[in-house]
Image: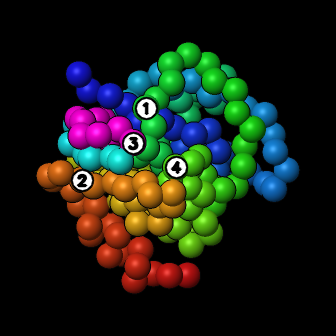
Amino acid sequence: MKKTMKCLAAAAMGVSLLTALSSKATSVTVQELSVGPDEVVNITSSTLGTADVYAGINKLLVNGVATDGFCIDPFHWSVTGVQNYDSQALSASPKSPGGPMGSAEATKIEQLWQYAYAPTISAAQAAGLQIAIWEIIGAGASGGATFTLNGNDYGASGLLSWVDSHPS
């Protein structure tokens, strides 16, 4: 059975909401509708074990508005139904263990979103972007949390090289 990684509202939302976040907490409702386009990948997470999971676009309803997003938390499973969250800066996510990621990692994720996301993204491209996000989170994880991809990275290594060579 494939599982979906948990998507935290403030961090997994589409660029329109991501750029609108401020330092003031705002209540939002988030419902994950589906994942796709996506690829199934095998990962090992210190909290989830080894599993096949979906890597790709999360189709969300955020305050009732259809939004594309990516999961930033390779340490928790998705939650079904409508969830209530308080928005926060991307740098303050994900929840423990693993987070918060900090401003450097958040900037890399924002850059990758702007560089690689498009509404017409293919399944392989979406998986590569998702895996790159998880790799960034995993590299900066705290609390003893670890993340490893087991297999095809769908171009994530190229995306990580790009973001490392464009630090501004």
The residue at 85%/50% (across/down) is: 24
Residue that badge 3 annotates? 47
Residue that badge 4 annotates? 97
Circle nearer the N terminus (1, 3): 3
Residue type at mark 2: give it: Leu
Residue 103, visible in the rendered structure: yes
For the residues labelled 2 and 3, the Cα–Cα distance comes to 14 Å
Residue type at mark 1: give it: Trp
On-image quarter of the C terminus: bottom right
For the residues labelled 2 and 4, the Cα–Cα distance comes to 18 Å
Number of the front mark, 1 or 4:
4
Highlighted range, magenta: 47-58
Say whether marks 3 and 4 touch (CB < 8 Å): yes
Say whether marks 1 and 2 touch (CB < 8 Å): no
Quadrant in which residue 120 is drawn: top left
Q: Secondary structure at mark 4?
A: loop
Q: Secondary structure at mark 2?
A: strand
On-image quarter of the N terminus: top left
Circle nearer the N terminus (2, 3): 3
Q: Is residue 97 magenta?
A: no
Which residue is at the front of the view, 63 or 78?
78
Number of the front mark, 1 or 3:
3
Which residue is at the front of the view, 152 or 37?
152
For the residues labelled 1 and 2, the Cα–Cα distance comes to 16 Å
Q: Position of residue 33 (x, y in %)?
A: 47, 22
Disc 1 packing (10 Å; few <14; some 14–19; many ≥20):
some
Q: Residue furthest top?
A: 81
Residue that badge 2 annotates? 149
Q: Secondary structure at mark 3?
A: loop
Q: Is residue 69 above or below residue 90?
A: above
As drawn, the label of residue 77 is 1
Circle nearer the N terminus (1, 4): 1
